[in-house]
Each structure stands twice: as C-alpha cells, then as structure tokens.
Amino acid sequence: MATKTEIRRQELRDSLIIIAERTIAQTGLSALRARDLAKEAGCAVGAIYNVFGDLTDLTLAVNARTFHRLGADVAEALADAPEDPVEQLVVMAQAYHRFAADNHLSWRALFDVERAPGEAAPDWYLAEMGQLFAYISDPLAVIFPDRDGEELALLTRALFSSVHGIVLLGLDEASAGVSTDNIDRMIALVLRQFAGNPK
Amino acid sequence: MATKTEIRRQELRDSLIIIAERTIAQTGLSALRARDLAKEAGCAVGAIYNVFGDLTDLTLAVNARTFHRLGADVAEALADAPEDPVEQLVVMAQAYHRFAADNHLSWRALFDVERAPGEAAPDWYLAEMGQLFAYISDPLAVIFPDRDGEELALLTRALFSSVHGIVLLGLDEASAGVSTDNIDRMIALVLRQFAGNPK
C-alpha cells in the first residue's frame, strides 16, 4: 500500500506535469522555469528536483504525453484513410502537419529538449518514436515488397524526417512562409513521387 | 569620403560580426550575449546597438556569411558531380549534410534565429536561400520537364526541406542516433527514389 508520502509525491508529480504541459503549450519550452513551476504548484523549488531529476526529465514526461496525442491523431487519420498504401502515407503525414500546426510549441518541444552531450533519450521515449515509425513502415513494406528490413527501416526514418522537414520549415513563417495548403501539397508531391505514383 | 566616425563604425561592425561568428560556432546562438560581445570588442554595450538594431540583426549578418560558405561548398560539390541530374541532387545534398555536420552550431543558427512574430526575414536573407534553391531547381527541371514553374518551385522547396529534415534529425544524436554513412544513404535513397531512379 502506498504511504501518504508516496501519494503526495505522485500528486505533485502529476500536478507538475500538467503545469509544465500548459506552460510549454502556451509560451514554449524556453519559458519553463523551476521557480514559476514551484509557485504555481504551491511547493518549494527543491521539491521539484525531489520528484524530477531536472527540468529535462519533466520535459520528457510532458513530451511523452504529446507523443501519445500525436500518435492518436495519426492513428485516427489512418483509420479513415483509403486502402492504398501511398495514400495512407499522405493522410498520416498531413495529420502530422495538422498536429504540428495546432500544437506548435508542444510539438517543437519534442525536438528542442536539450540533453547533455552523448546522453541518449530514455528507452520509453525511443519506444514512443518507434510506434510512430511503425505506422509508416507498414504501408512502406506493401509499397516496396523487395526491400529488406534494414532498408525499410532506413526508408521509414528518411520519410519521417522528410515530412518533418517540410512541416518544420513550412510552419516557420519568418524564414519560409508556406501556406497550409502548400505544405499539404508538398507532402503529397514528395510522398506520391517517392512511392512511384505521381498524380 | 568616409568620415573617421563612419570608418570606426564600420570597423566595429566587422569586428562584432567576427566575434559573434566565433561565439556561435563554438558555443551556439543561445550563448550570444551583448555584454560578452562588448567586452571582447572593447566597446560599450550601447555601441553594439548603435551599429546593429539588436542581436537578431547581428545574428542575421553572421548567418549571411554562413549561407555564403554553405553555398560555396554546394557549388564546389556540384562542379565535381556527374552529368546525371539525379546524382547532382545527391551530391549536393550530401555536401549539405557535410557542411551541417562540420559547422553544426553555425548551421543550427541559420534556422534558430528568432524574429518577432509576423516579422519576415529581410530580402537579402531570402535571396541567399533563393540561391541555394536555384542549385536544386535546375536539375529538377531536367528530371521533370513536364512540371510547370509553380510545381517546380514547390518540389524544390519540398526536396530541400526533406534533405534538411533528414540531416537535422540524423545529426541529433540524442533522439535519433543515425550514423554519418546512414544519413548519406537515406539522402540517396529518398532522392533516387523520388526522381524515379532507384538503385
């Protein structure tokens, strides 16, 4: 049975994640400060570091929730997608674009979180990314039945990165200035062309 | 004829760009501080803002030099590339990867510079990007003779963004961990597949 201390610790943990999630969504990862979090959670600054090793750990906990929401959106788009594997890729990539546009700062935090040099992401974090990659590799395996597993893994990562790049630079109004429609067109152009099915 | 004041102002400008360029290359854009710059340049903090409107303006001046170096590397790679337009794209994209790996923090600063919301990049900055895009659109026009100008422009931007995404996530060891060889393989896979010339 959990002790009172354990329950309080868990409650503070949940509360800090919710507060940090809102802060990141509204003002971005760079606005996350231990002092502000402590004030809003009604705890001492030291209590945060008692629950999370550092703000990066807290950010990873927030990012895990963002990855889950993103995965759910992609899965929902896939459920409504046509049977054609190329169109499945297009629909998922456009869902990725929509999620990134609607949750811009939370989405940026997925990639902007800073780790110490050489420190890899935790396994559960890589597992979340792996789930996203699985959505891509399934249709790719149908499109490219002759590619072996290692090539499919590279293609999967390459396609995810390509769509990510199109969305990232497309949403960066200051440097690129691409309309929402044109981001979706670029995604469809690249994926259809890539999969040998230009329309 | 330039007055002494004008000459001193120009010298301070040049000196600040050199110092900021080294700071960004060694410790990244986020380490750029007016106080440190002033100390190293031997001027008052206010003198910086007399020459540059703000640190963003100074960063853009540094980024312009980085864009020039990047463009020169891409042009050099293109000069040695085979005649085949698909292979030209591959060679240029791999030169982009090499530049990003060798000049990682300077390259990141090209995209991480923060502007006020809604404020577009200056024209000369967009012109630098346009020059890079021209290197891509020329072979694309050979590969896709039937695409009209607007489609070629979208394809060009989409391909640049795709390669950028592959390089960006590939070099982010903490989240992705892709070897240099595999980044080059992903680039070649996507571009050859994209251009209908899978090998």
Image: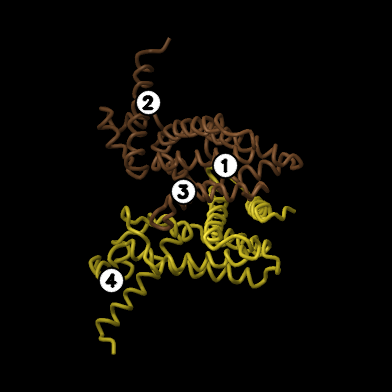
Chain colours: A brown, B yellow
From mark 3 to mark 4, how far is it between C-alphas? Answer: 40 Å
In percent of width and height, residue B109 lies at: 43, 58
Near mark 1 (Cα within 10 A), the count class, few <14, some 14-19 or many ≥20, is: many
B187 to B15, vertically: above or below = above
Give me the disc on residue B103. Answer: none
Kind of residue at badge 3 = Asp
Give whichever of A45, B115 is nearer the camera.
Answer: B115
Q: Which numbered marker is on residue A90?
A: 1
Q: Which residue is mark 3?
A: A181
**How far is the residue under mark 2 from the one under mark 3?**
40 Å
Q: CA distance from mark 2 to mark 4?
A: 48 Å
Q: Amino acid at mark 4?
A: Val
Q: Mark 3 falls within which chain?
A: A
Q: Secondary structure at mark 3?
A: helix
Give the alpha-carbon distance from disc 1 to disc 4, as whole Å: 48 Å
The earlier-in-sequence mark between 3 and 1 is: 1
List x then y, in percent, for residue B34: 30, 62
Q: Residues within 10 Å of mark 2 (few under 14, many from 20)?
A: some
Task: Please state the chain letter of the residue tagged with numbered disc 1 in the rendered image.
Answer: A
